[in-house]
Amino acid sequence: KLVANPPKNLLFTGIITRQELVNYLNIANLFLLPSYDELFPMSVLEAFSCGTPVLLRNLDLYKAIIDGYYMSGNNFDDFNQ
C-alpha cells in the first residue's frame, strides 16, 4: 500500500549511483533504519559521513560501536517522537 501510494515526502528511487546517494543523504532530514537484526550496515556510516542525523533501533551492537552518535528507539512510538 505504501509503495503504491507513498506520501509526498517519501521517494522510492530504486538503484542509484554513489553520487546520487550522497546527494540524497546531504538533503535528508533523517536516516532511519528500524531493523531488528542487523550486522553493522555501511548505510549508517554513509549517513554519518554526510552529516545526516541517524535514528536506529536500540540494539546492543550499535551501543557497542557508535553509542552517543545517533538517536535510538525501541518501537514505532519511540521513532515517531
Image (cartoon, rainbow, N blue to C red):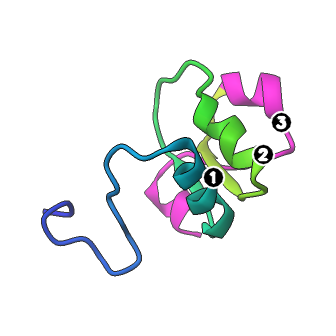
Q: Amino acid at mark 1?
A: Val
Magenta span has 6?
Answer: no
For label 3, count other residues whose C-alpha is less than 10 Å away and answer few (under 14), some (14-19) or many (20+): few
Classify residue 78 by image quadrant: bottom right
Whether residue 43 sits left or right of residue 69 in the image: it is left
Q: Position of residue 47 (x, y in %)?
A: 68, 48
In the structure shown, which secondary structural element does the residue marked by tag 2 occupy?
A: helix
Task: Name, please, the residue furthest toward the bottom.
Answer: 8
In the rendered image, which residue does mark 2 sit on?
49
For label 2, count other residues whose C-alpha is less than 10 Å away and answer few (under 14), some (14-19) or many (20+): few
Query: In whole angstroms, how far apart are the C-alphas of marks 2 and 1?
Result: 9 Å
In the rendered image, which residue does mark 1 sit on?
22
Query: In whole angstroms, how far apart are the C-alphas of marks 3 and 2?
Result: 16 Å
- Camera-nearest label, 3 or 2: 2
Q: Which of pointers 3 and 2 lies earlier in the amino acid sequence?
A: 2
Q: Is residue 16 above or below residue 81?
A: above
Q: Amino acid at mark 2?
A: Ser
* Residue at the spot 32% in from the left edge and 58% down from the top edge: 12
- Residue placed most toward the observer, 22 or 75: 22
State which region is magenta. Answer: 60-81
Task: Name, please, the residue furthest toward the right.
Answer: 68
Quadrant location, the C terminus: bottom right
In the rendered image, which residue does mark 3 sit on?
67
- Residue placed most toward the observer, 5 or 24: 24
For label 1, count other residues whose C-alpha is less than 10 Å away and answer few (under 14), some (14-19) or many (20+): some
Whether residue 52 sits left or right of residue 58 in the image: it is right
- Residue placed most toward the observer, 31 or 37: 31
Task: Name, please, the residue furthest toward the top.
Answer: 39
